[in-house]
């Protein structure tokens, strides 16, 4: 009886460890910042909301191959312009996850807003009913560059 109990206890412990590790690996990247523009609201079940839902569903599938995503749908005041950018060192599946996490967060934090922006460590996402640069936010990353000299050389080469 004791051996059977020990065997089940071991199996149960193994399952708990696996679930804990899976949960740890599946956690989203740190959420840095968001902006709800509060310029205008959309009405539930409106054409704008249907366009926004379509845009946010399609956006993660529009990778240009360089980590840049964009999708626009609709006309005039019902138009939704959505775009996103992932860090260059992020793998495509991690980028897609970051974009999906951003979409979920913005829907939660900016309900019924026609314009919202999410900044994660790995990606940036914005949707709006207007074109143009309406916001500039400078965020510093807490991630160390590792080799500072190599980083500075690379920056100098890009700037020259």
Image (cartoon, rainbow, N blue to C red):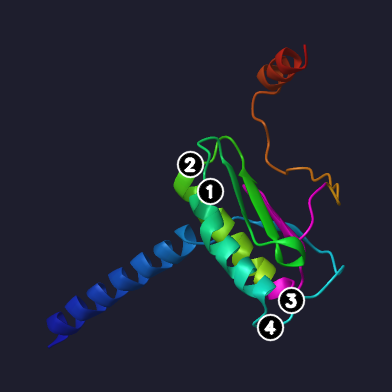
Magenta run includes residue 98: no
**Who's the residue at 61% across and 40% down the image?**
87
**Disc 1 to disc 3, C-alpha distance:** 25 Å
Q: Position of residue 107 (x, y in %)?
A: 66, 72
Mark 1 or mark 4: which comes first in sequence? 4
Q: Where is residue 100 in the image (x, y as percent from the top left)?
A: 55, 60
Question: Where is 24 relative to 148, above or below?
Answer: below
Mark 1 or mark 3: which comes first in sequence? 1
- Tell me if label 3 and label 4 are in contact, CB under 8 Å: yes
| Front one among 16 and 90 | 90
Location of mark 3 (residue): 112
Which residue in the rendered view is the most extreme toward the front?
75
Location of mark 4 (residue): 44
**Who's the residue at 66% across and 49% down the image?**
121
Q: Decide if residue 110 is on the left or right side of residue 95.
A: right
Magenta range is 108-132
Q: Give the structural element (helix, strand or loop) at label 3.
A: loop
**Disc 2 to disc 1, C-alpha distance:** 6 Å
Magenta run includes residue 121: yes
Between circles 2 and 3, the one closer to the viewer is: 3
């Amino acid at each position: 009886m004791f051996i059977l109990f020990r065997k089940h206890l071991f199996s149960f412990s193994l399952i708990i460890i696996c679930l804990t590790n899976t949960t740890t690996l599946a956690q989203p990247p740190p959420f840095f910042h968001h902006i709800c523009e509060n310029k205008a609201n959309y009405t539930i079940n409106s054409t704008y909301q249907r366009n926004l839902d379509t845009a946010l569903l399609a956006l993660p599938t529009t990778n240009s191959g360089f980590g840049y995503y964009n999708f626009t749908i609709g006309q005039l005041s019902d138009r939704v312009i959505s775009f996103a950018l992932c860090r260059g060192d992020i793998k495509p599946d991690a980028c897609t996850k970051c974009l999906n996490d951003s979409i979920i967060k913005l829907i939660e934090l900016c309900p019924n807003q026609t314009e919202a922006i999410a900044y994660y460590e790995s990606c940036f996402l914005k949707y709006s009913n207007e074109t143009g640069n309406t916001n500039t936010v400078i965020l510093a990353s807490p991630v160390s560059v590792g080799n500072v000299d190599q980083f500075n050389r690379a920056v100098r080469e890009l700037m020259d």
